[in-house]
Image: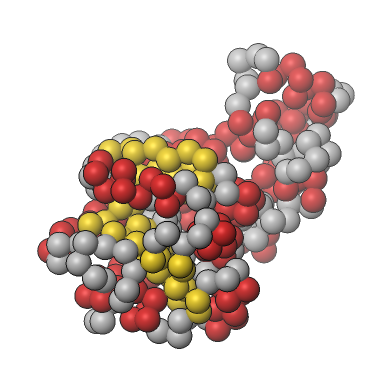
Amino acid sequence: MAQIGFIGLGRMGIPMAGHLVRAGHEVRAYDRDPNALAAARETGATACDNLRDAVSFSEFIFTMVPTGKHVLEIYTGPDGVLSLMPAHSLAIDCSTIAVGEAQKLHAAGKERQIAVLDAPVSGGVMGAQAGTLTFMVGGEEKHVDRARPILGAMGRNIVRAGHAGSGQAAKICNNLLAGISMIAVSEAFTLGKRLGLDPLILREISSTSTGSCHALTHYPPVPNILPNVPSSRNYQNGFAADLMLKDLRLAEGAAIETGSSLPLGTLAAGIYSMFCQSGQGTLDYSGIIRMIEGALSQSPAA
Ligand code: NAD
């Protein structure tokens, strides 16, 4: 059993903390939102009304907050977590943030002799609830090995991506792929429908053909092809388009920093941006098919 401090009890943090409690760990939770703290209490965690109480006696500190700005404030701000963590404890940030921000956190930890891992996740709220998240971890191997049994309570796949910041690099590249391919699959299904194809048949054919990909086989944007995906529940309770846009923006930032070009990534970010600006950003990102269908119906060829 480990002593764990958990900061950020939102949609992801609550089910993740719940798994840690059920695995027998003692979890001290902190969130600046009292409603989140109340929800944390229901998981069996000890709700703390300040950072110090959550962090001071913990061997592992988890953070699961919205952005890199939040992460750096929490760890490196005045009376931040790095100054409160006991010696030999391990900080594990699971938020999705920029590679450069993660590297800043690793460097700030090093200055204070605190080990840090960047460990963003894939699998969304459903994966967090089911305890089947994939963790992509950046940092020293010995620290990853130390974290592995704790991460194992929340996830099924724990992969060391490489040095500091590599977890975030892997997350951004993965979501670049996911965001672009969801648009591609939406276009194919929309065109197929207008050509008279049954979407079930198109999926069956493409899933064993060269067009196969995760969005097509496991996460189709067309409702009622698969029962347990967001498209079959009106695009609710999935991976919000707002978050996909955030991750594509992180990819664009990383591309600028590394002198890379992302012709499709930039286009995809523009498409999700329009979708979010139309007030649909809280819908699952597969809801992008609604906009693709609308755009096609206005095109001269439709
Ligand atoms: P959320 O907004 O539901 O929860 C974030 C929580 O952090 C909130 O309860 C908020 O009050 C708390 N918080 C913010 N600043 C804080 C501070 N300074 N001190 C204490 N608490 C603070 O967000 P989420 O959906 O749980 O996502 C968290 C992170 O996980 C994000 O970086 C997101 O990109 C990433 N992520 C989310 C999903 C998803 O499907 N929701 C999937 C993969 C990755």
- Residue displayed at 43% across by 40% down: 158
Furthest-top residue in this view: 209
Furthest-left residue in this view: 111
Q: Is residue 243 left or right of residue 186?
A: left
Q: Where residue 268 sits in the image (x, y, percent)?
A: 53, 43
User: Which residue is at the front of the view, 79 or 220?
Assistant: 79
- Residue displayed at 64% across by 34% down: 215
User: Which residue is at the front of the view, 96 or 57?
Assistant: 57
> Quadrant of the rendered structure where residue 225 is?
top right
For the rendered model, the colour scheme is secondary structure
For the question of whether residue 59 can be seen, the reply is yes
- Residue displayed at 26% across by 76% down: 84
The quarter of the rendered structure image containing the N terminus is bottom left
Q: Where residue 67 sits in the image (x, y, percent)?
A: 41, 64
Q: Is residue 164 left or right of residue 197?
A: left
Above or below, 52 relative to 227:
below
Above or below, 152 relative to 93:
above
For the question of whether residue 276 can be seen, the reply is no
Q: Is residue 134 left or right of residue 137?
A: right
| Number of disc labels | 0
- Residue displayed at 28% across by 38% down: 162
Q: Where residue 126 sits in the image (x, y, percent)?
A: 64, 50
Above or below, 120 relative to 83:
above
Q: Where residue 196 sits in the image (x, y, percent)?
A: 87, 24
The quarter of the rendered structure image containing the C terminus is top right
